[in-house]
Image (cartoon, helix red, strand yellow):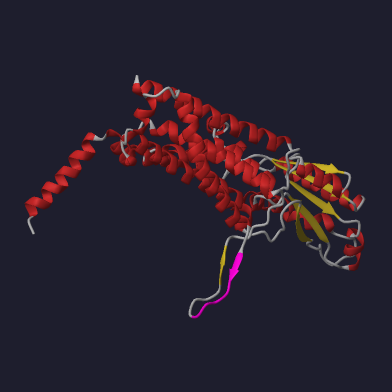
Amino acid sequence: MSARRILAVARRIAQGFRRDERTLGLVFVVPIVIMALLGWVLNEQKDGAVRVSIVNQAGLIGDRIVDALQTAAAEADEPMTIDTLADVDAAREAIRAGDTDLAIVIPDSLLDDLTSGTRPTLTVISEGTDPAAEAGRFQRLQALMADLAGQLAVPGAPAPIVPRIEVKTVYLSPDATTVDVLAPVFLGYFGYFFVFLLTGISFLRERIGGTLERLLATPVTRGEIVLGYTLGFGIFATLQVIILTLFVLSAVEVPAIGPIPAFTIGMGVESAGSPVLTFAIALILSLGAVSLGIFLSTFARTELQVIQFIPIVIIPQGVLGGIFWPIDQLPDVLAAIARFLPMTYAVDGLREVMLKGADLGSSAVQVDLVVLTGIALFFVVLAAGTIKREVA
């Protein structure tokens, strides 16, 4: 074994990196940018006001609770608003419309429970589609309710009674798992990622192999070339979305075979809305990834350079696309950027359909579909223009 030959090989690799500015940027600059982006989001994330509505069915003693909570909310360090609604149906409708975050139902049996020494039950209703965010809101509400027992003191009773809290949700079950909540994210994000990677590398090979140059020498227009490639790659994108959708929404139990224990293929997540609409949103997002992959691959000379676009294009969409934090809690600059990202609209649309049961009549779903389609067509036009500039 020769140390001189080993050093020669290592020197050749180092010189190759030194001549490739994109790779150096990926190694030294991009990680810092991604870490800075995460730090910016975490440090400057807005702590939005928690909106609480109270349904008072208990009369005067319930009014005491409402007044106490409103006073505590006004004095709290973290913003919170307290209002009242007529009944439970109105509270659920307000949550569906996004007009309130939590609803507290004070039962009409409250006074009887307190008089008899029975621990009363207050019901807290939440949306049920984002357990992490709702847990934070519930903690802030609990902090306000810490001194609520003092408002429930009944003359002659030995001590105030601390109420029991029962949690109910509008959409998912209170026992919904993390997989149930993140299923729309899995379907959208991973489909987008793999389709982009497949398209970018495949189109690069078409360029390197000379196929694209030969097509440009024919009467076929550049727009026709891009649309043809988009359709061709789109077939495989469609197959991939079908497989992902089936895997997320179905579950096949495989019995034990010899020493191999029984196992399940698929996640078995129940979609509250139409699986066909779920598939349509994921497909349009993936077709957008096809056109984006074609566009960006025209700036790459090697497969490694195509992969280098992932931390620049795909990862920031995971950070800013509403997957981990609501868009309205991001810093203003990042929230504005998030409005231009396809992942923002895909995640919103898939959550609306899979978690809330929305259909094509939903204005939110309509907006998401229109924007995703527009983004896909926008990159088709860009790709056609880029090919023209490249061979000019």
Residue 24: within the magenta? no
Q: Could you tell me residue 158's position as x and y percent?
A: 84, 67
Q: Could you tell me residue 306's position as x and y percent?
A: 37, 39
Q: How many marks?
A: 0
| Picture quadrant of residue 281 | top right
Q: Residue at x 42, y 22 (%)?
A: 219
Front residue of this view, candidates 222 and 356: 222
Position of residue 195 in the picture relative to residue 282 (left or right): left
Q: Quadrant of the N terminus?
A: bottom left
Quick one: which residue is furthest to the top in this view?
392
Determine if residue 220 is in view. Answer: yes
Front residue of this view, candidates 198 and 3: 198
- The magenta stretch spans which residues? 252-258
Determine if residue 46 is in view. Answer: no
Quick one: which residue is furthest to the front in this view?
219
Front residue of this view, candidates 376 and 220: 220
Q: Could you tell me residue 156's position as x and y percent?
A: 90, 64
Q: Residue at x 34, y 19 (%)?
A: 392
Residue 254: within the magenta? yes
Position of residue 117 in the picture relative to residue 36 (left or right): right
Relative vertical location of residue 145 with respect to residue 43 in this rendering, above or below: below
Q: Residue at x 50, y 45 (%)?
A: 236
Q: Could you tell me residue 161's position as x and y percent?
A: 81, 63
Front residue of this view, candidates 320 and 371: 371
